[in-house]
Image (spheres, grey):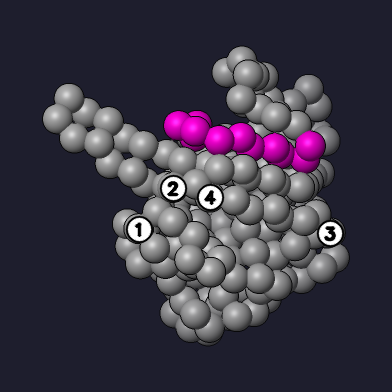
């Protein structure tokens, strides 16, 4: 589902060159739940952004669902990303002025489907994360765990094959973190979605199929 070959990312200014990633090689199978760990600044989020087509590697090749994206136009890349990939962020990134169901609908606005169908899919996604009774609430009326569940619903509403989660339990206490993790595990098993999760939490990482460790931009395990 995701194949990274000799992926490197280098940031350059006039006076300094910083290597964020160095020759990363990863094959992530369809339906796999992979976690990525490492100290702050080791390149975890950079790697996730490259997998999610939010950033481009300086060197190397990336295949997503068998497609090489390097030569895609910006518009084609955006369309491909919207159809294939769902994102979950540590800080939720919900729009405070929109109701929960409207937040969940957002990825569908870029597709040629009716408003009625968008609403139906958003309702189904919220039902699947146990928030059927919160559709008309605003984010400020939700707990941290509920906000993250809304973020998960938004990530899965378009039924993507790949879900990328950046510290999805990082802002939650252990109880809420376990609840969110259980949702991700069930989603992986029931829908067959491929999930890649960045985390600092060893306990959460051990619940996934495979663990990759980064250090100073390089894969060490």
Q: Nearer the N terminus, badge 4 or badge 3?
A: 4
User: Is the C-beta separation of discs 2 and 4 under 8 Å?
Assistant: yes
Q: CA distance from mark 1 to mark 4?
A: 12 Å
Label 3: which secondary element: helix
Q: Which mark is residue 15?
A: none
Name the side, left or right, on which 144 lies relative to 103: left
Residue at image mark 2 = 22
User: Is the C-beta separation of discs 2 and 1 under 8 Å?
Assistant: yes
In the image shown, does 180 or 4 lie closer to the viewer?
A: 4
Tell me the magenta residue range: 56-66
Q: Quadrant of residue 209?
A: bottom right
Q: Quadrant of residue 210?
A: bottom right
Q: In the image, residue 36 lies at what x, y percent?
A: 53, 64
Q: Nearer the N terminus, badge 1 or badge 4?
A: 4
Q: CA distance from mark 3 to mark 2?
A: 33 Å
Other residues around mark 4 within 10 Å, as few (<14) / some (14–19) / many (≥20): some
Q: Residue at x 64, y 19 (%)?
A: 72
Find out whether residue 57 is within the magenta segment.
yes
Q: Nearer the N terminus, badge 1 or badge 3?
A: 3
Other residues around mark 3 within 10 Å, as few (<14) / some (14–19) / many (≥20): few
Other residues around mark 2 within 10 Å, as few (<14) / some (14–19) / many (≥20): some
User: Is the C-beta separation of discs 1 and 4 under 8 Å?
Assistant: no
């Amino acid at each position: 589902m995701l194949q990274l070959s000799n992926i490197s990312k280098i940031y350059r200014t006039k006076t300094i060159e910083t290597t964020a990633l160095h020759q990363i090689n990863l094959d992530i199978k369809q339906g796999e739940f992979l976690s990525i760990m490492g100290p702050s600044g080791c390149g975890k989020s950079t790697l996730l952004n490259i997998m999610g087509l939010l950033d481009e590697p300086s060197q190397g090749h990336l295949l997503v669902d068998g497609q090489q994206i390097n030569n895609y136009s910006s518009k084609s890349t955006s369309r491909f990303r919207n159809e294939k990939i769902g994102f979950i962020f540590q800080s939720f990134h919900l729009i405070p002025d929109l109701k929960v169901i409207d937040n969940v609908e957002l990825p569908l606005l870029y597709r040629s489907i009716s408003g009625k169908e968008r609403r139906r899919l958003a309702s189904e996604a919220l039902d699947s994360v146990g928030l059927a009774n919160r559709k008309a609430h605003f984010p400020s009326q939700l707990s941290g765990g509920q906000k993250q569940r809304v973020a998960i619903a938004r990530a899965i509403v378009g039924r993507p094959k790949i879900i990328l989660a950046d510290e999805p339990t990082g802002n939650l206490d252990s109880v809420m973190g376990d609840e969110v993790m259980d949702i991700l595990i069930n989603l992986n098993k029931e829908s067959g979605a491929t999930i890649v999760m960045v985390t600092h939490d060893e306990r959460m990482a051990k619940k996934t199929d495979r663990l990759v460790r980064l250090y100073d931009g390089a894969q060490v395990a």
